[in-house]
Image: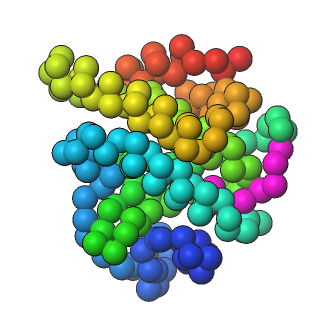
Amino acid sequence: MTHARAFGVPVPEVFGVSGSDIMMERVAGPTMLEVLARRPWTVRDQARLLARLHAQVHQVPVIPELPAPCDDDAGRDREVLLHMDLHPQNVILTATGPVIIDWEAAARGPAGYNVAMTWVIMHSSQVEGRHLRVSLTRALQVAFTRSFARAAGPIDQAWLAIAVRHRLTDPNVRPAERTRLERLPHG
């Protein structure tokens, strides 16, 4: 986070680290997901903002000590900083602008992989609630992922397949999400 912040990425300021504990700036505001739930008509604007945040993160030079999340050489691009979990729930919209949180999965690799992972997370995440709420939320998810893909550039199919395979190995993936993931190409 300190490295990303040094390159202008909006992240909370880190004051100190002791083992696995981090003391950092408190960030106040709704998440992008909360804003989308309250103001669904902002879906395109929020998707474009998320794509811009990705572009900002991808301008940060790689830290060689960070792990590379995959060993696949499919279309290897220049390695950059990757968030690997940059979706609407990990962006807080503060009074002074967006702030990216939850950097525990940060890695190094090609920007296209990070974008594909975000698309996969947003496309497949499980929605809870009653039938009408689920239907409306799924429609919003579809609109958001389409707008994000347009704003972030075409989603590379090779990285998409790798991102799907990576998500399928996550033990925290819920049943409905797993079903949607298995429908995506990941051969």
Residue at image position (26%, 40%) is 40
Q: Is residue 105 visible?
A: no
Comparing 174 with 140, the one in front is 140
Res 134 quadrant in image? top left
Q: Residue at x 59, y 63 (%)?
A: 56
Q: Vertically, is 68 above or below 164?
A: below
The quarter of the displayed image where residue 165 is located:
top right
Across and down, in percent, residue 166 comes to 61, 34
Q: Position of residue 3 (x, y in %)?
A: 61, 75
- Residue most toward the bottom? 15
Residue 67 in the image: state x and y as whole percent.
70, 56
Quadrant position of the N terminus in the picture:
bottom right
Q: Is residue 26 above or below residue 164?
A: below
Q: Is residue 59 magenta?
A: no
Q: Is residue 62 above or below residue 146?
A: below
Name the foreground residue: 72 vs 32: 32
Q: Visible in this render: residue 132?
A: yes
Q: Position of residue 5 (x, y in %)?
A: 55, 76
Q: Name the quadrant containing residue 163.
A: top right
Horizontal arrangement in the rendering, residue 103 relative to residue 59 (left or right): left
Q: How many marks?
A: 0
Q: Where, quadrant-wise, is the C terminus in this rendering? A: top right
In the image, taking residue 181 as reference, residue 164 lies left or right, namely right
> Magenta part of the protein: which range?
76-82
